[in-house]
Image (tube, rainbow, N blue to C red):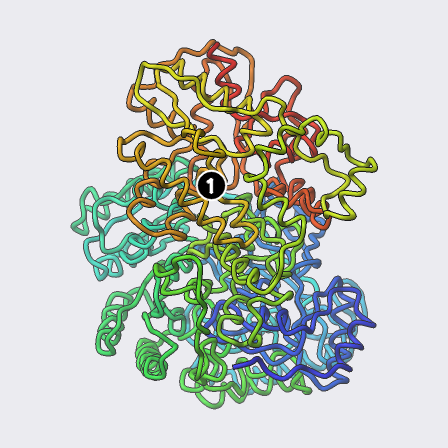
Amino acid sequence: MPLDNPPSSRLETRLKREIKGDVMFDPFTRGRYSTDASIYQIEPLGVVVARDKDDIAAAIQIAREEGVPVLPRGGGTSQCGQTVNRALVVECSKYMQGVGEVDTGTRRVKVQPGVVMERLNARLRQHKLWFPVDVSTGDRATIGGMTANNSCGARSIRYGNMVHNVRAIDAILADGTQAHFGEVPSNLGPNGPNGDVEPERYRNLVSDMRALHRREADEIDARIPKLLRKVGGYNIDMLAPKGPDSGHNMANLLVGSEGTLAFFTGIELDLQPIPPHRVLGICHFPTFYAAMDATRHIVELGPAAVELVDRTMIELARDIPMFRATVERFVQGEPDAILLTEFAGPDADDNLRRLRQLVELMGDLGFPGAVIEATDPAFQSAVWNVRKEGLNIMMSMKGDGKPVSFIEDCAVRLEDLAEYTDRLTQVFHKHGTNGTWYAHASVGTLHVRPVLNLKQELEVKKMREIAEEAFAMVREYKGSHSGEHGDGIVRSEFLEPMYGPRIVRAFEEVKEKFDPYGLFNPGKIVRPPKMDDRSLMRFKPGYTQAPVETVFDWSEWGGFASAAEMCNNNGACRKSDPGVMCPSYRATGDEQHLTRGRANTLRLALSGQLGPDALTSDAMAETMSLCVSCKGCRRECPTGVDMAKMKLEFLAQYRKRHKLTLRDRLIAYLPRYAPLAVRLAGLLNLRKPGATLAALGEKFLGFSAKRPLPRWSSRPYRGASPTDAGPEVVLLVDTFNRYFEPENARAAERVLTRAGYKVTTPDLSAGRPLCCGRTFLAAGLIDEAKAEARRTIAALKAAVAAGNPIVGLEPSCLLTLRDEYPALLPGEDTKALAAHAQLFEEFVEAETKAGRFNLLFRAMPGKTALLHGHCHQKAFGTAAAAADALRLIPELAVETFDSTCCGMAGAFGYEAEHHEMSLKIGELGVLPKMRAAAPGTLLAACGTSCRHQIADGAQREARHIVRILDEASR
């Protein structure tokens, strides 16, 4: 099932000649841009990543002259298929992120369409202002996309939707006219608000739209729902004059237009003061119906938000490592539903008073003691983060059945909410399924998703039947079938049943007046296709997963292809916060180098849509080339996309068709030749950056001449000295800490011995030291990796059987035993080893809590330790244990910081073609932080790669925590 035929070469040639930004027409790129967070997949003609307004204007002109449609795109996270089309995609999110000067007097700011909401709010914070349309995807949603979608957010009950917060829009029309869409007086003259002469085209549009509203005013009043959450169609109801002598705001018409009327190049926003105080009441309910019925009473207390979390979301979140601890803290017992109720404002006492009223109200409603009060800002933030990731949490369900978005934004009056949700649940049951519920209870808009398998024709038919019944019910309650996420493909065809033929003809007239060419995003809002047209869906008729003999066990997901399908395209990997995921995307801004981009490419390849050999092609290798295997997605992707493991599977498949380079062999086989190479340490260490040997090494081997290689030790670690006393601990020393930094292994042995343990190391008399096999995995040499794994499992079997802890120093090596081994060699012995394998800091934490780690440390008054956590530590939640281990030293201040990967990532930073990218990733957080540390600060990092990156990129020495603990315990 290949993708569509390629577009004309003339279009591509013209764009590449006239566009400053990126122009991409290859099938892999078009495949990556063929999906958004909806159920649809439509391959675009090509992709332009615009650098500025001139690029946008040029792309529109070329597309118009070549007769092809244009699709504006931001973060590509639309739920309804707004950002997929057989068109030329023009993306703004990479380059067009400008923020103008903030006018604190009028509380306004003008931004470019590609700026991400939370990055904007970070800029506004210094002025104590924020943009309050706080959508759950705000850490990756662009303001342009939010404007096009008329987004709403959790606090719309107080601040309204985008249409209430957008002051003006600069846009380019299909004929190339550039105009400022904003407030227009009742008598529109030739001059705009700033004295500029308005284009005649713009003035004609104003006149046409006013005439349309006068003609259809009665029908608009009769058919458009009187609700806050109504975002269906065009906002023609807002064309009415605001007073007898005033006009209207033309920007209102562009908000929610889904890229069908004009292309936004600048957006002026109204801002609000940041509420200095917030409190959160977490209301627990034994039944879903009770929660829905209580919402109308809670809203009377004047909250800023009332958000629903249902039982399904609670249970799924408990299974996701990054959310588990928070859920256990804020969920009391086994509720069927929870309402997160926030009070915010300038008066802290008033917020607390209303929180007490909430507690009293819950008691009056028959639920005494059912409110957890959250007044700590950090706790509130953690709770809201779980709610923000509600969609991705719901989509973390494994298997072909997924919660499907098609009726999820229906809005009804609060007095109808309980009855509506109860009746809709009965509809689901009639069709043999259930729905997941969460989100905006405060405004009667709940994100409800029936669980369906859209790979099956019968389930697609079921989807349509549910949609028709649900929308009929919404009309009965005089609600809105589209309450937040817009129309797109999934809801546009239902505009006529919802609003009637006259209103839909009015929508068509708006489209024709603005875009007579039909250039912008055709098929959305007006003249749409059928929502259940499977030819437009991600799982089209005939969709199959190509058979692949995998090297890892993917049964937990239902197979390798199903694991790739877990990506729902919601774009959490594009997030702007300082978590680990996704370092290469943060450095490049390219969809190709994003977890989502890689997962989509794998899915297309594994379903045959990129050709028969796509999985092992050079284009796939390029797609995977900047994945640094940080495992950030393993923990931070709410749907569980483990791209690091997927990359290892890809490499194994790729290696079947492609030979190793000499550099690949040197890296992969390092553990096997290291015992011999270390004897030549003096000779090998002669290589210096920039010198002749380094230049030759770059030319013939591919190691960057700008980077020093790790120095071989003249005194490698040979094993623990035997002792008789104490419980036994097996110290598993990896290749890097054995041959390059043996002082770490010796320090660990000393610390454990002083703490009363009998330290042993695996017997080396039978041959070379044990190796986890990670270097072989990273080269795609699975047979060799399995051989190393079997050696390790066999050598440690007796210690595991005796219950002895297996303690390691290098996170990437030790955690291979816990992560890759069970998928590589599933079995009881592997499982037992994984259960006993611990990083040094985990062992110290556990033994300290048990009262068995008996070691006195000398105080370090006035000293600070700055700790950078290795990505794999963060992925497995052990970074905090490393900090806690350092805190055992009296009077030592321990500082940690959030950041993405350091950028070294094993051999990645040593490779000539990746050296600059490695440093660019490091400069995203780790290197500036280490560079800025005060002199005398103890810099700490548990990862070998991290320490070398800090030394090379920040010119500072970082040490493993065992060295600091050893020093303090002498």
Count of marks overlaid on the render: 1
Q: Residue 269: percent from the left, percent from the top?
A: 62, 57
Name the residue located 38 percent from the left edge and 46 percent from the top edge.
321
Q: Is residue 112 above or below residue 204?
A: above
Using the image as rendered, state which of residue 276 and residue 595 is in the foreground. 595
Name the residue located 72 percent from the left edge and 50 percent from the top edge.
913
- Neighbour class for label 1 at 10 Å: few (<14), some, many (≥20)? many
Indicate the quadrant where residue 623 lies. Answer: bottom right
Name the residue located 36 percent from the left edge and 35 percent from the top edge.
796
Which residue is identified by label 1?
772
Indicate the quadrant where residue 532 lies. Answer: bottom left
Q: Is residue 538 above or below residue 389?
A: below
Using the image as rendered, state which of residue 215 and residue 963 is in the foreground. 963
Indicate the quadrant where residue 741 lies. Answer: top right
Name the residue located 72 percent from the left edge and 86 percent from the top edge.
67
Whether residue 269 is visible, yes or no, is: yes
Q: Residue 85: percent from the left, percent from the top?
A: 58, 78
- The kind of residue on which mark 1 rests is Cys
Q: Is residue 742 left or right of residue 354?
A: right
Q: Residue 525: percent from the left, percent from the top?
A: 53, 80
Task: Work out which residue is located at the far left of the displayed protein and give it.
Answer: 366
Q: Secondary structure at mark 1?
A: loop
Whether residue 133 is visible, yes or no, is: no
Using the image as rendered, state which of residue 800 and residue 195 is in the foreground. 800
Q: Is residue 180 left or right of residue 673?
A: right
Using the image as rendered, state which of residue 458 and residue 233 is in the foreground. 458
Q: Is residue 244 left or right of residue 701?
A: left
Q: Residue 640: percent from the left, percent from the top?
A: 42, 55
